[in-house]
Image (cartoon, rainbow, N blue to C red):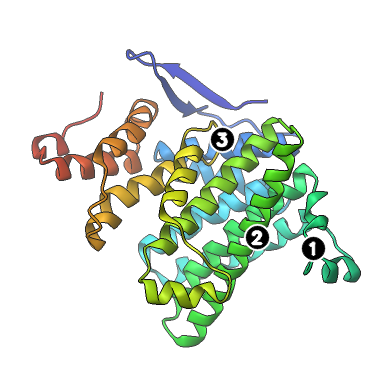
């Protein structure tokens, strides 16, 4: 059941928008929740933030993807405004989202929990819904860690945020292990492809960002399980951006941010504007008025020295 309305533009590419009146789903399974979350993402990329929240809120206490999407929008708003009320509202929503995701995660007995410390066998038997619950839970943890740093700039908040990031990183590594096992068995389904997109986004982002840390700090972090390989991180994000999963555009945005900001700020000399333009091009046709898309389009134009193009409106 797909809710997206697709119109064809003069370039033959799809311009994605949503219905003026949002249809209400009468049931909510994994497939439907991903489709509705995809529709909400289209709304956000078309600057329809209120409509996206209205779509996600009714099921935000029952569906892991609705909970993740709803908390993501509020977390983004809080990170942009730095208003105390926005941060508090986002933190409360993320807490609810974590509880929602937790309900779908694999239930383990005490014996299974202890055995999982020395064996990965328990994760091999995850159902599709449980696999997605792990990814959604890890993403919610990262949101909470980010807002923890923003909320209070003290050592306790730093430690709390660090613990959440460590937990999220470990979940992504476990999910990567599960993905490799399922693929080795020849598994192939839409749910698995969506799961793969989430794994590549998480593993790619962690590896890329950790690799940017000074070597001395990275060596210290390796003692607690962190590791960062820049080439591997970039390859994972590129593979994620090339998929048709819900998180493909998030992988693309991560690469865009790396090429248009991180490389320049850190002076790595690895900025690739050609790749950035290639990543952005399909989304310029799909979301020609989207503020996030136009932001990166203008940023690339500035870096290219095409200042006249910055103010131009996309066709």
Q: Which mark is residue 245?
A: 3
Q: Residue at x 32, y 12 (%)?
A: 10
Residue under circle 1? 119
From this view, report whether residue 109 is shown above or below residue 172.
below
Q: CA distance from mark 3 to mark 1?
A: 30 Å
Task: Determine whether the residue tagged by mark 3 lies in a helix, strand or loop.
Answer: loop
Q: Residue at x 45, y 80 (%)?
A: 152
Across and down, in percent, residue 219 comes to 46, 74
For this orientation, the residue located farthest to the bottom is 155
Q: Is residue 96 left or right of residue 113?
A: left
Q: Is residue 145 left or right of residue 99?
A: left
From this view, report whether residue 114 is shown above or below residue 93.
below
Tag in front: 2 or 3: 2
Neighbourhood count class around disc 1 (C-alpha, 10 Å): few under 14, some 14–19, many 20 upward: few
Q: Which mark is residue 194?
A: none
Q: How many marks?
A: 3
Q: CA distance from mark 2 to mark 1?
A: 14 Å
Task: Determine whether the residue tagged by mark 1 lies in a helix, strand or loop.
Answer: loop
240 or 115: nearer the viewer: 115
Residue 150 appears in view: no
Neighbourhood count class around disc 2 (C-alpha, 10 Å): few under 14, some 14–19, many 20 upward: many
Across and down, in percent, residue 86 comes to 46, 65
User: Badges 3 and 1: C-beta atoms under 8 Å apart?
Assistant: no
The quarter of the image holding the C terminus is: top left
Q: Which mark is residue 171?
A: 2
- For marks 2 and 3 on the same chain, the one whose residue lies earlier in the sequence: 2
Task: Determine whether the residue tagged by mark 2 lies in a helix, strand or loop.
Answer: helix
């Amino acid at each position: 059941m797909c809710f997206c309305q697709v119109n064809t533009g003069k370039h033959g590419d799809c311009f994605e928008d949503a219905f003026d009146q949002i249809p209400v789903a009468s049931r909510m399974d994994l497939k439907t929740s991903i489709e509705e979350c995809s529709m909400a993402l289209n709304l956000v990329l078309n600057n329809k933030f209120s409509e996206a929240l209205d779509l996600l809120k009714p099921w935000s206490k029952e569906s892991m993807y609705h909970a993740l999407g709803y908390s993501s929008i509020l977390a983004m708003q809080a990170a942009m405004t730095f208003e105390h009320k926005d941060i508090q509202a986002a933190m409360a929503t993320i807490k609810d989202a974590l509880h929602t995701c937790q309900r779908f995660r694999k239930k383990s007995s005490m014996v299974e929990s202890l055995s999982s410390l020395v064996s990965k066998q328990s994760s091999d038997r995850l159902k599709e819904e449980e696999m997605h619950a792990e990814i959604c839970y890890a993403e919610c943890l990262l949101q909470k860690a980010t807002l923890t740093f923003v909320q209070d700039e003290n050592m306790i908040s730093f430690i709390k945020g660090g613990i959440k990031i460590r937990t999220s990183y470990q979940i992504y590594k476990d999910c990567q292990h599960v993905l490799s096992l399922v693929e080795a068995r020849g598994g192939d389904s839409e749910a698995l492809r969506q799961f793969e997109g989430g794994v590549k986004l998480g593993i790619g982002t962690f590896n890329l960002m950790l690799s940017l840390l000074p070597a001395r700090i990275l060596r210290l972090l390796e003692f607690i399980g962190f590791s960062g390989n820049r080439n591997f991180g970039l390859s994972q994000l590129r593979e994620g951006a090339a998929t048709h999963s819900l998180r493909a555009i998030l992988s693309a945005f991560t690469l865009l941010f790396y090429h248009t900001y991180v490389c320049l700020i850190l002076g790595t000399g690895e900025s690739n504007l050609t790749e950035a333009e290639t990543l952005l091009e399909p989304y310029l046709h799909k979301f020609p008025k989207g503020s996030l898309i136009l932001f990166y389009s203008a940023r690339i134009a500035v870096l290219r020295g095409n200042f006249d193009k910055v103010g131009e409106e996309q066709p």
